[in-house]
Image (cartoon, coloured by chain):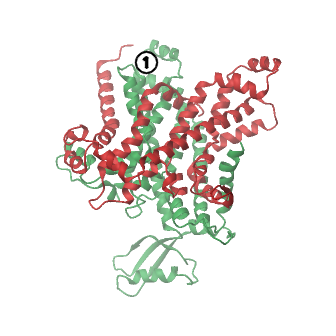
Chain colours: A green, B red
Amino acid sequence: MVLLLIFLVTPVLLAFGLGFTNAKLSSPKPAEIVGISNFEKLLKFSKVEVSTTSTEPEAIYAEVRKLTKPGSGTPYEGMSILRGSIASDGMSGSFFLAGDPLFWKSLRNTVFFAVIVAPLQGGLALLLALLVNSRIRGRIFFRTVFFLPVVTSMVVVSILWLFMYQEYGLANNFLNFFLPNYQPKNFLADTSTALPAIIFMSVWQGVGFHMLIWLSGLQTIPAEQYEAARVDGANGLQVFRHVTWPGLRNTFVFILVTITIAAFGLFTQIAVMTQGGPLDSTTTIIYHAFWTGTRKQMIGYSSAIALIFFIIVVTISLLQKRLTRERD
Amino acid sequence: MKTSPIVRGTQYFFSIGMTGVFAFPLIFMIMSSFKDKYQIFEDLRSWRAFLPVGDVSFEQYSNAFDRTPVFTFLGNSIFISAMVVILGLFVNSLCAFAIARLNFKGRGVMLGFLIATLIVPFETIAIPLLYLVNRLPRIKVIDGIQFTTGWLNTYSVQIIPFIASGFSVFLFVQYFKTIPRELDEAAIIDGASFFKIYRTIIVPLSGPAFATSAIITFLATWNAYLWPVMVVQSERLRPVQVGLDYFFASGTDEGMAWGQIMAYSTLITVPILLVFIFFQRAFVASVASSGVKG
């Protein structure tokens, strides 16, 4: 209990506290309280319209820089461009500015990852569970094979897939085999395919675990219920809808919550495979926190990110529990 | 009920297809570990990638051994995992025993609190934890006893924070509740102390709970990556997963030595896979029981 207090509760409280300071990892100066400035920097976000009289292509950016440079005295001081669009004449444009554009990018990537992975992995896991729960031959063998990637460490899995995703790698050759006109590409070097590639791999690695949890849920449904349905002449789909699915309610909530939380913690794959690239298209909240905390040693700022992450995760799990309960 | 042949056929088709999807990457890894880089690339375009054909040898293994202190890493991982598992079993089961059996105030609060810790992902606390361990007092026993601060670069920093686990305590509490209280009461009448009850009644009856906790803790520790990367800089103390970074950081002139990478990956993965296949039943049961808490 003491250990738990020291190494679990203290860090959580520290995260709360440190988020408001400018602590550094190994700094001789004691940490100072800087109030909410970490959060301000993280969450600051605004839109500006700028126009210029010059037709020089760089002039419009110079206008934005005037607003954001230190000491400019504008509310946009210290911010950077997250995304912008320039009118066709090149004389005006609108820009989204953020205190920490990388944070917003990582938030977007993380949410995208979680939103795709949760239903995909949960659904596929259920399919696999139904398969190995049916009376086909060799179901123990299938179950074992589906579970193998779960026992393999994420680092090894990431490296293996890093190799397979290369331009001349197995994934491309496999696609080429079925689609003769297919153009091989390096999945991880392209901003549009890097994150989907990581999603596919993550599902591959994790789905076996949730298959087993569905399976244990399936096995708690009493056989009498199936028999009763059969006597009533229900077909396979009806049995699933009216007997199997209602019996899996609790399992469903558990799986949804655990996959979502795990998906939000996406880190190892990124650290091993892409380091957040190409062009920040795969950076995630935890990777961002890790980067600022260890490489830049900005513990205070990093804790602020972790705290925001914590709030998001708790909110999501409470929300999911609430939503799934109300449907009863 | 008879399942129609069409449904059955689809089931088999899907199962076998999925088996391919899940097994081929791993087979590819193992087979490639016996080939050199050129052979791997040559075989990539055909089924040969999944077969031990061509110039097959253990050369990649010996190269990987030359390149990294594999045995040091393996030893570290075995030591760290064993310590976390053994100490964890002891500490967590005793804590659970206290919650499940002793009548003291605040038991309910304690249990509720434990369950609450389950939803905190490790990633959230990793950075503050780093800050914390960097400031903890440490006793060095090199050239006499010295007192310093900072636990970075030690075995303790990889072991102690992970001994106590809310999940394990919860698992034990759930299991201990199924052991009839009459057994303890009989023992108390015979004059047994609480620790004796724990040792002679609870522990022998809780095999499955101990197995589950041990398996899950071992897997998590063996596969740990984020934490060791953050806290260990010394080669002497690195665990196996971090060892993989060597093949990237010290890239050779001819690019990545994929054969060696595959050999090293196989070396740290296959033992675990074999243990898993061997203890399949206990394994599956333990993961399934971890889902019950939902």
Q: Residue furthest bottom?
A: A54
Q: Residue at x 31, y 38 (%)?
A: B27
Where disc 1 sits, the SS reads loop
Quarter holding the N terminus of chain A? top right
Q: How many marks?
A: 1
In the rendered view, does B7 fall on the left or right side of B194? Answer: left
Q: Is residue B83 left or right of residue A117?
A: right
Q: Position of residue A113 (x, y in %)?
A: 45, 50
Q: Quadrant of residue A23?
A: bottom right
Please say whether residue B171 is visible from this viewpoint.
yes
Residue type for callout 1: Ala
Expressed as whole percent of the image width and height from the top left, the position of residue A253 reads 55, 37
Q: Residue B12 sits in which quadrant?
A: top left
Outermost residue, front direction?
B143
Please tell me which residue lies in front, B157 or B127.
B157
Q: Nearer the viewer, residue B282 or A244?
A: B282
Q: Is residue A62 above or below residue A33?
A: below
Image location (x, y in percent) of residue B200 = 70, 22
Q: Please report the residue visible at 48 percent of the width from the left and 59 percent of the height from the top.
A: A106
Return the residue at label 1: A234
Task: Answer whether residue A164 is visible to the viewer in this image.
Answer: no
Quarter of the image containing the C terminus of chain A? top right
Q: Chain ID for label 1?
A: A
Q: Is residue B102 left or right of residue A173?
A: right
> Is residue A13 depicted above or below B6 in this figure?
below
- Measured as percent of width and height from the top left, residue A111 is found at 48, 53
Q: Residues within 10 Å of mark 1 (few under 14, many from 20)?
A: some
State the residue in front, A50 or B231: B231
